[in-house]
Image (tube, helix red, strand yellow):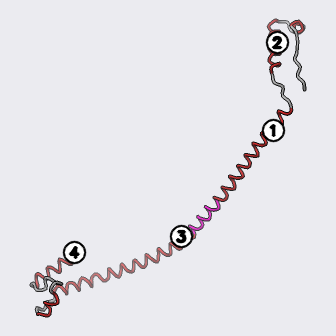
Amino acid sequence: MAFTKLNLTRDQLSSFLTDQQQIKQFELLFQAVDTLQVIVGTDFEYQADTASASANSALDQIASLSQKTAVEDAVLNAKIQQALDAIPVLGQDTAINNAVLNAKVQLSLDAIPRLAQSLELLALAPIRNNIELEHDVVGILPYANQTQRVRSNQVLTWLSM
């Protein structure tokens, strides 16, 4: 569509406008219309093509992000399931280890009074003072040749450590 300029004179404008101010305003209006760019159909087509390409690019990005998110979600769900599956096994192992530990602690606690009684009896036992015993204990029990009172005190000191 060709664009033609309106070439109206002041005399033509005064035929339907009564005031000089109105004529001046119309002249300014015509100047503004003359400077406007003519819009043709190809401009709209170009803008539509550009918008369509941008929309397609955005859709491709959304699809790519969706696929990546789905893969990451599947990996995370697999790891969560693996952890959840391991919980009962770990609970059983912990219960078994706890039971074994409790049994060993109880056995140790039960043995303490017997060990204390044996040590007390050992501390009170007389040491035979003969050559064979002296030969056996030299360097091993340095207080073997001491009096019974010294030996008893030494044993009690060892027990209190």
Residue receiving disc 4 = 161
Residue mark closest to the camera, 2 vs 1? 1
Q: Is 58 in front, or is 12?
A: 58
In the picture, which quadrant includes the N terminus? top right
In the picture, which quadrant includes the C terminus? bottom left
Q: Amino acid at mark 2?
A: Glu
Residue receiving disc 2 = 27
- Magenta stretch: dominant SS? helix
- Asked if residue 2 lies left or right of residue 143, the reply is right
Query: Is residue 78 magenta-colored?
Result: yes
Q: CA distance from mark 1 to mark 3?
A: 58 Å
Q: Position of residue 47 (x, y in %)?
A: 80, 36
Q: Count neighbours of disc 1 (C-alpha within 10 A) and say few if under 14, some if 14 to 19, many if 20 or more.
A: few
Callout 2: SS: helix
Q: Is residue 147 above or below residue 97?
A: below
Callout 1: SS: helix
Residue appearing at x 81%, y 24% in the figure: 37
Residue receiving disc 3 = 87
Q: Position of residue 61 (x, y in %)?
A: 70, 49
Residue mark closest to the camera, 3 vs 2? 2
